[in-house]
Structures are given as C-alpha cells and as structure tokens.
Image (cartoon, rainbow, N blue to C red):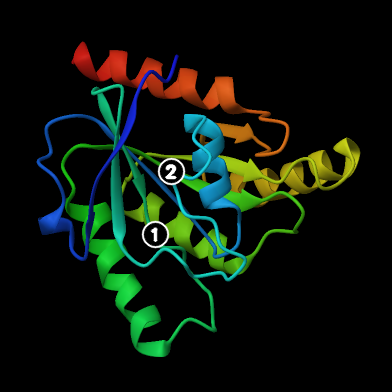
Amino acid sequence: MQIRSTQFVKSSQTYSACPQANMPEYAFIGRSNVGKSSCINMLTNHGNLAKISSKPGKTQLINHFIINNEWYLVDLPGYGYAKTAKNIREGFAPMISDYILHRPNLACIFVLIDSRLNPQKIDLDFLFKLGENEIPFALIFTKSDKLSAKKTNENIQLFLQTIEEYWETLPPYFVSSAVTKAGREEILNFIEQTNLELKNL
C-alpha cells in the first residue's frame, strides 16, 4: 500500500463523538511509552502526525486520521502509566472500552508490545479482554532495533509462547522499528488486504 494522503479529522472524548463510521478503522494502542506515536508516524511517512513526547501518557483522547480517503487510523490513549493524573488515568478505561466494544467499523486493533521486555501482565490482560469480546487484533512488536536480533527474537517468541497457551491460533504479528522502518510494508499490506476482504463481504 502506498500512503498518498493523511489528514487529521478530530479528537474525541467518547466513542459516540467519533467521526461517522463509514469506512474501515484501524486502532493503535499499547502500554504507555511503547513507541506508539513513533510507529504511527513511521507507517504514514509523516514526521509529526502523532505527537511524540518523552513524557509517557501524552495521548489522552481518541484521535482519528483519514488515510488515502479510504480508511481511518485511530490513535488511542495508552494504558498503564502510573504518573498520569489519577482521575485522567481512570477515565481511559471506559473511554477505551466503550470505543472497542461499540465502534461498528473497527476492523482491527494493533496492540503494540515492547520487544525489549519479557511478557508484561498489563499487556496480557488487555489481550485477554480483547479475546473474551472477540475483538480482532494484531500485534506489533516495537523497538526491534534496540537489542540484538537474537535477543529480540527470543523475547518475541517468549511472548508468543505465553499467549499460545490461551489461543488456538496465534494472532497476526509484525516486528517493527520506527528507526529502520522494519515492518512498515508488512503492516500496510495487512491493512490493504483486510480492506479488500471487507469490501468483498
């Protein structure tokens, strides 16, 4: 897929305030400081489409971008950052939950996982909630340039083995780096193929 155009649409505090659900939607979410904004900017070839901050917890709204006038990219608030103000942090849960459970055009949620780390309970818990509610998702292992290829692969395999105990079939997954742009073509091709399948339903 070639990214021909990207345009910010709006930021919403609730799923009901989101743009009209008239085209496929792909949401990006992950534990705070997982590299979500960098990943989105890498995928869209846009240096500052999603705001990058050294301070985790920057995204606090549901942010919609329209890509190629064909599909929405959605930047969701991260989860699990303790230093975000308590009242704001507690507000993320219903905001994210309502969006995920009630957005009719949600084609896939990309859950970003830090490839440098062993499996984190907060990530696993979030995936289990998606599975319980039969929400389609794919994994993006971020920051693959930070460790050796061997160590990165070991961490990824450990994560996959952990969730394999609970899923009969592993979800699609991609290994990415905002620095090297690894995974960009594969992720965009996955979105393109999913869009085609949705059109043929």
Q: Is 115 placed left or right of 94 in the picture?
A: right
Q: Determine contact: label 1, label 2, CB under 8 Å.
A: no
| Quarter of the figure with residue 178 | top right
Camera sees residue 166:
no
| Quarter of the figure with residue 156 | top right
Mark 1: which secondary structure? helix
Alpha carbon distance from label 1 to label 2:
29 Å
Note whether 83 is above or below 184 in the view shown. Answer: below
Q: Residues within 10 Å of mark 2 (few under 14, many from 20)?
A: some
Residue 111 percent across, percent down from the top left: 49, 48
Q: Amino acid at mark 2?
A: Leu
Identity of the residue furthest to the front in this view: 47
Residue for point 30% across, 20% down: 195
Residue for point 9% across, 41% down: 20
Identity of the residue furthest to the bottom in this view: 86
Residue 197 percent across, percent down from the top left: 29, 15
Residue 26 percent across, percent down from the top left: 34, 37
Camera sees residue 185:
yes
Residue 138 percent across, percent down from the top left: 48, 38
Q: Residues within 10 Å of mark 1 (few under 14, many from 20)?
A: few
Q: Which mark is residue 49?
A: 2
Choose between 49 and 37: the one closer to the eye: 49
| Residue holding disc 1 | 129
Q: Is 157 placed left or right of 136 in the picture?
A: right
- The mark lying in front, picked from 1 and 2, is 2
